[in-house]
Amino acid sequence: MARPGTDFALSPSVDNDMRRGAMGLGVQGAVYRLLSAACERARPPSGRHPWWRDLPPAWRGEVVEPIAFRVYREPDLAAERVFGRDEDGELCFYAHHYLRPVGTRARPAAQGERVSAWRLTDLRWLIYRVPIQGEAWAGRGFYAFSVSPPV
């Protein structure tokens, strides 16, 4: 069952519930460790959500900057959805990732995807999608424009 949304706050224990759910689950635990390692590398020291992580530097001035985040986590699936809102409360950032174990205990692997999307000042959405296939984040990411967020 999905955990209700919470305001985003990074701390050393931010993934404790996911970690507890994944320990001792063989492939699922190994998949969690892959996801956790990737997320730890992406976390900024400031404690803010890394909403800009996949945003090309040339587009940084063209997006509406989020000031508040809601995060929804599903520990059993190593999944997360993030909604970022601007000062008017409108959705201006969206991200999700999920991993589904498909390997064996000896060779853990995962399927899933990682998506980040930013609302541009002209109301279009810039979407970055990375399919995940295999033993790690092996997919090649790509950008696309849309008139709506990928929610």
Image (tube, rainbow, N blue to C red):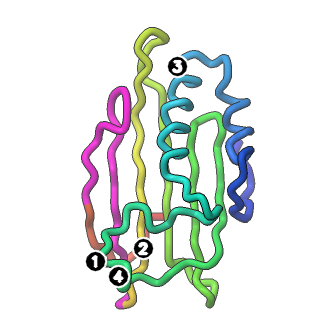
Q: Earlier in the sequence, mark 4 or mark 2?
A: 2
Is disc 1 in contact with disc 2, using a CB cutoff of under 8 Å? Answer: no
Q: Which mark is residue 58?
A: 1
* Residue drawn at x 55%, y 45% as measured from the top left: 40
Asked whether 47 or 91 is in front, the reply is 47
Q: Earlier in the sequence, mark 3 or mark 2?
A: 3
Q: Earlier in the sequence, mark 3 or mark 4?
A: 3
* Residue drawn at x 52%, y 19% as measured from the top left: 27
Q: CA distance from mark 3 to mark 4?
A: 39 Å
Is disc 3 in contact with disc 2, using a CB cutoff of under 8 Å? Answer: no
Q: Residue flagged by tag 1: what amino acid is it? A: Ala
* Residue drawn at x 65%, y 27% as measured from the top left: 22
Mark 1 crowdedness (10 Å alpha carbons): few <14, some 14-19, many ≥20: few
Badge 3 element: helix
Mark 3 crowdedness (10 Å alpha carbons): few <14, some 14-19, many ≥20: many
Asked whether 137 or 125 is in front, the reply is 137
Q: Residue flagged by tag 3: what amino acid is it? A: Val
Disc 1 or disc 3, which is closer to the eye?
1
Q: CA distance from mark 3 to mark 2?
A: 33 Å
Position above or below: 120 against 108: below
Mark 4 crowdedness (10 Å alpha carbons): few <14, some 14-19, many ≥20: some
* Position in image of residue 44 (x %, y %): 55, 58
The residue singled out by tag 2 in the image is 118
Q: Which mark is residue 27?
A: 3
Q: CA distance from mark 4 to mark 2?
A: 8 Å
Write down the region rendered in magenta: 122-142
